[in-house]
Image (tube, rainbow, N blue to C red):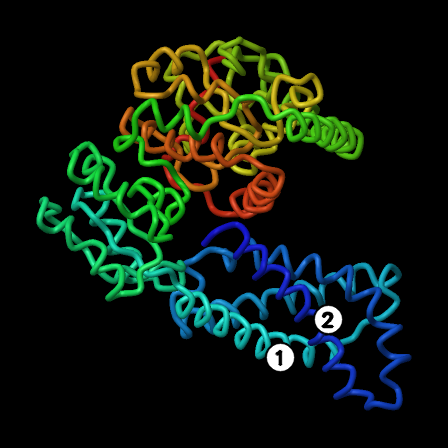
Amino acid sequence: MSLPKKFALFLGDILLLYVALAGALLIRYGVGEFGASFDTHVGPFSKLFLLWLIVLYIADLYRPAALRSRAAIWRSLIRVVAIAVVASTVVFYLFGSEFSLTPKTNLLIFGALFLALDALWRTTVRSRFAAGAANLIVVGASPLTAATIAHLRENPQTGYRVVDWLERPDAAALQTLPARIAEHRAGMVVFERQTLLNPDALAAAYRLLPREVALLTSTDIYETTFERVPLAEIDETWFIRNITTRRRFYDALKRALDLAASAILLVVLSPLFLLIALMVGATSRGPVIFRQSRIGKLGRPFTLYKFRIMVKNHDGSPVTLTNDPRFTGIGKFLNFTHLNELPQLWNVLRGDLSLTGPRPESAELVAQYASLPYYDIRHVVKPGVTGWAQINFKPSTSREEAFEKLSYDIYYIAHRSLLLDLLIIFRTVKHLVAPVRQNAPADLGGQTR
């Protein structure tokens, strides 16, 4: 699902929150008292709607899989609305003076109405996405192409419908492409990248230009569908066409937002910083702040700051495990909650890091992974506290997993935008509260001191 489609779904949810509120007040108070009751409730509920949207996002209801079936839509929404209603009740009672009301009955009616309306909305969106899907003719049969076709056929809500597949695009089959386009009313023809190395296929694609059909490669569809780049299927020409290292307006605005956010959070969280520092110092000997050299933009090293979570002067792997015996008394908790990462806000303020971007690795791991194809491209942008790879793939423990994780980093670099940055930050919240995988490395940079 493309970002514009996700954004449309998000805007629809915002509208339905207010429609459900209006409906609940009409049911409860009638038409005569609707105006006064709406004025009383719209302010407090508007604050609450932010919580509902965060719950919807954390529950992954803006990802394509959330629309895979009507049953899946209803199951997800019932669970999410129940959680949101309970959370709203807690918020109203804990911060009653802020909201000036405790609407038990109104909240239940609102929740039921939103559940019904949003299920109808998402079911309609799913049908519209499927009905408006672009008809694709696919040329070529690499494993990547086959996997993409299988996924598209199982998920019509993605917006693509495979209507024909030329698995063996010989010269005779390629000559039939115009007739196949007319027969299936195809709007797109997808060529496997390797197929275009065949002069006959390249000539066939060229002859389709006057027919007003979109010509794409299999890597284009894979990238859109899975939100990662198929590194094994591309070459340097892809990077020349898709990677822009300097984007003045975006870079300047992102830096301004990084400065504002890090400065505000450092001030607001300063009591928490002090509390953690006291706990670290009281439970083990050694410095409170752990410092480690990491590789930043353009391969330049910088010092990364974290709260120390391991015993001083230990020997061991640079990979940190969930149940690592080197943890201090408070270290395991800080690692589990990621609170040890908070000092990186200072790195953001200094300009070493951005809030979002590829995670910076230690020089040791950079040297280890340097031979991976295109690994150096990670360093053309500023690294981040959190990133697209971190929220879409588990921490890597091998070169193979590091290469797979790299496919998400390259996708981010090619598609980075303020909207994508915002999506990363919101989805990071889910990862902060989700259980940590047993014995999974928490951070490949590790702490070696």
Residue 24 vertical placement versus 43 (above, below): below
Task: Tell me if 382 is positioned left or right of 249 in this view.
Answer: left
Between 13 and 309, the one nearer to me in the picture? 13
Tell me: 444 left or right of 186. Answer: right
Three-letter code for the amino acid on which mark 1 is drawn: Ala
Res. 404 image quadrant: top left
Q: Secondary structure at mark 1?
A: helix
Residue drawn at the location 45% of the way across and 54% of the way down: 1
Q: Residue furthest right?
A: 36
- Residue mark closest to the camera, 1 vs 2: 2
* Residue at mark 1 to residue at mark 2: CA–CA distance: 13 Å
Residue 170 x/y as whole percent:
9, 45
**Residue 130 location in percent, x, y?**
40, 67
Q: Amino acid at mark 2?
A: Tyr
- Determine whether label 1 and label 2 are within 8 Å by CB: no
- 272 left or right of 154? right
Q: Residue at x 62, y 38 (%)?
A: 418
Q: Is residue 71 above or below residue 379?
A: below
393, 31: nearer the viewer: 31
Within 10 Å of disc 1 (Cα), the crowding (few <14, some 14-19, many 20+) is: some
- The numbered mark at residue 18 is 2
Identity of the residue drawn at 29% across and 30% down: 234
Q: Earlier in the sequence, mark 1 or mark 2?
A: 2
Which numbered disc covers residue 112?
Answer: 1
Q: Position of residue 259 (x, y in %)?
A: 74, 26
Q: Circle 2 sits in a helix, a strand or a loop, which is it?
A: helix
**Residue 20, quarter of the rendered image:** bottom right
Q: Nearer the viewer, residue 76 or 328?
A: 76
Front in this rendered view, residue 192 or 359: 192
